[in-house]
Amino acid sequence: MKILVPIKRVPDPELKVKLKDGAIDLAGASWVVNTFDEYAVETALRLRENAESGESHGEVVVVTIGPDDAGQQLRSALAMGADRAIRIDGEDKALDSRVVAAVLAKVIEAEKPDLVVMGKQAVDGDANQVGQMLAGKLGWPQATFAATVELAADKASLTVGREVDAGVEYKTIALPGVLTVDLRVVAPTSVKNNITPASHSYGTGEGGPRYASLKGIMAAKKKPMEQKSIGDYGVDVTPATRELGITLPAARAAGQKVADIPTLVKKLVDEAKAL
Amino acid sequence: MGNILAFCEFDGGALRASALSNLSFARQAASAHGGEVVALLIGVGAAAAGPAAAAYAAKVVTVEHGDLGHYLAETYAPIVARLAGEHGAAIVCATATSVGKDLLPRVAALLDAGMASDISKLEGGNRFTRPILAGNAYSTVEVSTPVVCVTVRQSEFAPAEPTGSTGSVTSADAGAIDAKGARIDRVDSQKSDRPELTSAKVVVAGGRGMGNGDNFKQLEALADLLGAAMGASRAATDAGMVPADWQVGQTGKIVAPNLYFAVAISGAIQHLAGMKGSKTIVAINKDPEAPIFQVADYGVVTTWEKAIPELIEEIKKVKATR
Ligand SMILES: Cc1cc2nc3c(=O)[nH]c(=O)nc-3n(C[C@H](O)[C@H](O)[C@H](O)COP(=O)(O)OP(=O)(O)OC[C@H]3O[C@@H](n4cnc5c(N)ncnc54)[C@H](O)[C@@H]3O)c2cc1C
């Protein structure tokens, strides 16, 4: 089984947002793999391995569109266990979801994966578009916002627990298809592949993506990383979306601490008129 | 000039509250584009809900077919894309519900349209403002494709009022239905008599500090007293204390009720992203340094064990005097 995982770098979401000349100030930003994309890599690895014997049952290819530096995020994914990487040279600023989906569709034509696993959204733009657009372009089925994933024993379909507004929807898609993952996909028993024993637990508690081991980091340095340019794919790369400006939200006026519950209720009634 | 095709979710012969926010955006967009609102209802029951939708839009198009009983992006997207062409749509819009978020980017791909997600404001034409970076900034974008797809943040658009006249209702053919090998096996949902989280006037939310699902029962008693919906932080949903669909935040639901209780929730940015727009925020937390106090209008530093029974008592007293 061959799994393609597109990943994107984002400015560290823990850092405070600063503006400069009407745009987000990224000078000196530290970049990390988008959280959901890291979870997508983890999901892909769980889908293709026998976690108990360590055997691999397929290939995981990571791809990013980004500048030279974005190679570091690909290396992180390789260090987690992905097999090879493709970096398509492009400037973060010159991309929108439509362009990214068009380029990825071409990558998929060339790579012919059985499955594409992606994060459900990037935590910088919060757009939540590319996976669905890609599936639409390819005419593939899509399973978005996955909290659980089970690969059928014949590897021809996936059954996905999707977190929807009304609860959890179980959707089965034939492969090839596009899977986008939500947070809980990295819980200890969220991913089953009918290879790893069903009783296996990835860590404890809330789980999480695996850390790269020292050995993994060393091995990643020798794994292949192909360099491409957007021009290689022959798609129109003019973005349809142009950013006109950024503003920061007005801070909420400072609130008050009240001494006890009776005072709180009194204020909710008299002052806030909320009760 | 162009029309606005508004994909509307419905339930039992009526539009969902979320659809009314979409229609309120659609109306603004129609006047900006000099076109009309076309409300689109797809699925089993669409024909029955059509007349209810006609109170809100100049035109209603319903697509009813037995094979469209459960929403699937694979079968719905081609219908929306085709009707966008047939109705001269400049904008195709939906509310950013789990259906809207799943569907509209796929429609955009079929139309080769650019898209703006989860917008909070129409600036005019095809210019939209939308939250980014977990709501820590707002970005204004212009989308330049001939047709544009938009999802609308429900909490930022007040529900549309009826137009005062009755729109026309027509039915459209489903066309060839191809699920591309996708199917729904089942949906696990917990029936609740409480209001929907995304449109409730009051929300009572609990976090990791609640300890376990049993303790949440006390918050539920408070919620029921107030006619409130229940919410939770990710830590509480991840720990399995409460269902995942209670999660409020960047990756959960976005809520903006009149009154939001954050109980034993620390106030991580990802949680704040989902509730900062609430009118009045009350925080109950035993840690005086918890960041939730920075956004709360009223904070009480105490344990929930002490606070919740007292709160229920006090509110009962207030109710008794009315
Ligand atoms: C990509 C990403 C997306 C995320 N999306 C979301 C999201 O959508 N929604 C979300 O909520 N989180 C989200 N998170 C998680 C978020 O970062 C926090 O981890 C989470 O919100 C913490 O939940 P909490 O406040 O319940 O738990 P904690 O941070 O552990 O806080 C518990 C609080 O309870 C208080 N407490 C403990 N005992 C008591 C008591 N007896 N009485 C009163 N107070 C008590 C403590 O003082 C503490 O402040 C996301 C994280 C990531 C990385």
Image (cartoon, rainbow, N blue to C red):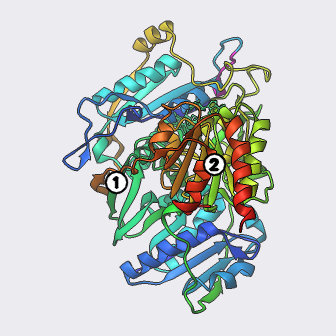
Residue closest to the eye, A75 or B93: B93
Q: Which mark is residue A262?
A: 2
Q: Would you say residue B303 is visible in this rendering?
A: yes
Q: Check the image and report above or below for A235 versus B170.
A: above
- The residue lying at 75 percent from left, 63 percent from top is B320
Callout 2 secondary element: helix
Question: Going by the picture, which residue comes out furthest to the bottom?
Answer: B165
- The residue lying at 75 percent from left, 80 percent from top is B48
Position in image of residue A187 (x %, y %): 66, 28
- The residue lying at 50 percent from left, 6 percent from top is A215
- Queried on whether the Cβ of the residue with tag 2 lies below 8 angstroms from ligand 1, the answer reads no
Q: Would you say residue B113 is visible in this rendering?
A: no
Residue closest to the eye, B22 or B173: B22
Position in image of residue A163 (x %, y %): 67, 46
Q: Check the image and report above or below for B313 versus B174.
A: above
Residue closest to the eye, B267 or A15: B267
Position in image of residue A1 (x %, y %): 63, 29
- Please rate how many residues cluster around mark 1, counting C-alpha atoms within 10 Å: few if below 14, some from 14 to 19, many from 20: many
Task: Give the magenta part as a residue range.
Answer: A47-51
Q: Check the image and report above or below for A250 versus A179.
A: below
- Queried on whether the Cβ of the residue with tag 1 lies below 8 angstroms from ligand 1, the answer reads no
- Please rate how many residues cluster around mark 2, counting C-alpha atoms within 10 Å: few if below 14, some from 14 to 19, many from 20: some
The residue marked by circle 1 belongs to what chain?
A: B
Position in image of residue B69 (x %, y %): 76, 65
| Residue receiving disc 1 | B139
Q: Check the image and report above or below for A200 versus B21.
A: above
